[in-house]
Image (tube, rainbow, N blue to C red):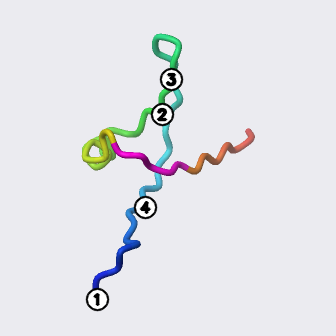
Amino acid sequence: MWCPWMVSIYVFEARVVKTSGKYLIYPPKEYQEKLKKLHGKKIKIVVIEESN
């Protein structure tokens, strides 16, 4: 059965880096290829900050 609301969920730890005045979320290398296919698309991101 086809579902028009199919989603992909990726869970990983990432670094936030500043480049040329912009902040980027830098994923681990194993997720970069998966996220590469989303280039140019709008996505939703949930950020969870853990206190030390």
Residue 33 x, y percent position in the rendering: 25, 44
Q: Secondary structure at mark 1?
A: loop
36 or 5, which is in the foreground? 5
Per the model, the C-alpha gap separating discs 4 and 1 is 20 Å
Q: Earlier in the sequence, mark 2 or mark 1?
A: 1
Q: Which residue is depicted at the point 64% across and 48% down?
A: 48
Which residue does the numbered mark 4 point to in the structure image?
9
Q: Which residue is depicted at the point 58% across and 51% down?
A: 46
Magenta-drawn segment: 41-45
Direction from residue 28 to residue 51 in the image, left or right: right
What's the amino acid at mark 3?
Val
Q: Earlier in the sequence, mark 3 or mark 1?
A: 1
Circle 3: is it few (<14), some (14-19), or many (20+) Cα within 10 Å? few
Which residue does the numbered mark 2 point to in the structure image?
25
Direction from residue 48 to residue 16 in the image, left or right: left
Q: Which residue is depicted at the point 47% across and 11% down?
A: 20
